[in-house]
Image: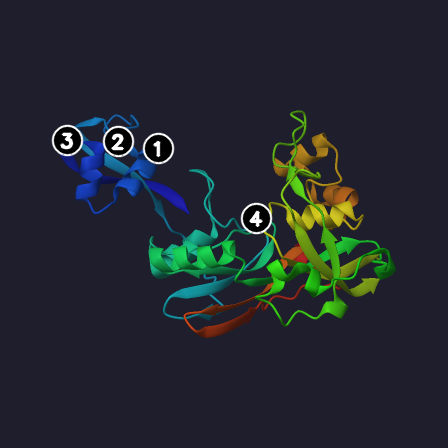
Amino acid sequence: MSYEKMKIGKFYGQKIYQILISQGYCMKEAQKLCDNGRIIDNFGSVLKKNSVANGDIFLIDYRCEPKGLKPIFECMEFGVFDKPSGVLTHPNGRHCSYSLCDEIWSLWGKKASVVHRLDRETSGVIVVGKSIETTKKLKAMFESRCIFKSYLALVSGKVQESKFKRFIAANYMDFVDKFSFINDENWLVIDRAMDITRDYDDIKIRMQICDNGKRAITLFRPIEFDEKTNATLVECIPLTGRQHQLRLHLFYVKHKILGDPIYGLERLDIERILDGKMSKNERIQKSGANRLMLHSNRLKFNYNGTEFDISSKMKFGLSPFAQMD
């Protein structure tokens, strides 16, 4: 994805928001364009919404450069992509060369939008609304926990099930009444509140376990253990949707997700990884993998009376570790 300067027209005496509204943007969209510095004049000066036009007005807009990634599922109102690791969900600034939006907007136009977010290094299924109305409706379903989400993760060590509490659905009816198909006997539970770290010397996005934080509940179960790598493939179901929930919960129970660039590392190493200054080999040595080994594997929900159960088509497992590349 690249940015290009597109001429809107020549205007005199009108405020910028009035011009944008006359071009078909709503007030909220006009405000966002101005706040993001996307409206400029002939001299390259950034214009605010109440700036008065005095000549040529330009929009700095995206030019999509799709690479051919296609949805694994599509209906009239939404589609589902299998996002590769390393691909941004949204563009993160003018120097972003590619994101999933290159594919989305080239297929369905600028009104289409992702419904939920996956971190850059997290792979797997992600839902895209084709219209603003559909996106809002699906987002509300995610927020009200009407959408079942299942993840796969490669974690360090062998999971000793006897060390964890068994999940009993009757104790969590407020969270699982929509997912009655979850089998009590197969799941272990982590029920620990969390919040963003208050240590200003820490990484700002790092979360912490704390009794006065927001309640967070994760179900998980081991699928396969590999003695050679001392790693376990686990399936995880977040009953709540906190930032970094799976990563922090698994780190807390001493089964860190391999490749995690934040939890379990020193600040200097974290910054080097986030800034792209650590080699792949060094990252493997320090974190166990050269990417976060977390994969969005399955989504199940009812939309407008129709049941959808969509699983990832990607291979993700203990062997081989080819998905790290």
Residue 66 at x, y percent in the picture: 42, 56
Looking at marks 2 and 4 on the same chain, the residue that comes earlier in the sequence is marked by: 2
Q: Are marks 2 and 4 in contact (CB under 8 Å)?
A: no
Q: Are marks 1 and 2 in contact (CB under 8 Å)?
A: no
Three-letter residue code for mark 4: Arg
* Camera-side mark, 4 or 3: 3
Residue 250 at x, y percent in the picture: 74, 50
Say which of 266 and 85 sits in front: 266
Name the residue at 68% across, 55% down: 218
Disc 3 element: strand
Say which of 51 and 200 sits in front: 200
To which residue does mark 3 refer?
Answer: 14
Disc 4 element: loop
The answer to whether residue 66 is visible is no
* Disc marking residue 120: 4
To which residue does mark 2 refer?
Answer: 49
Name the residue at 47% across, 50% down: 99
Relative to 260, residue 142 above or below? below
Looking at marks 1 and 4 on the same chain, the residue that comes earlier in the sequence is marked by: 1
Q: Are marks 4 and 3 in contact (CB under 8 Å)?
A: no
Looking at marks 3 and 1 on the same chain, the residue that comes earlier in the sequence is marked by: 3
* Disc marking residue 35: 1
* Disc marking residue 319: none
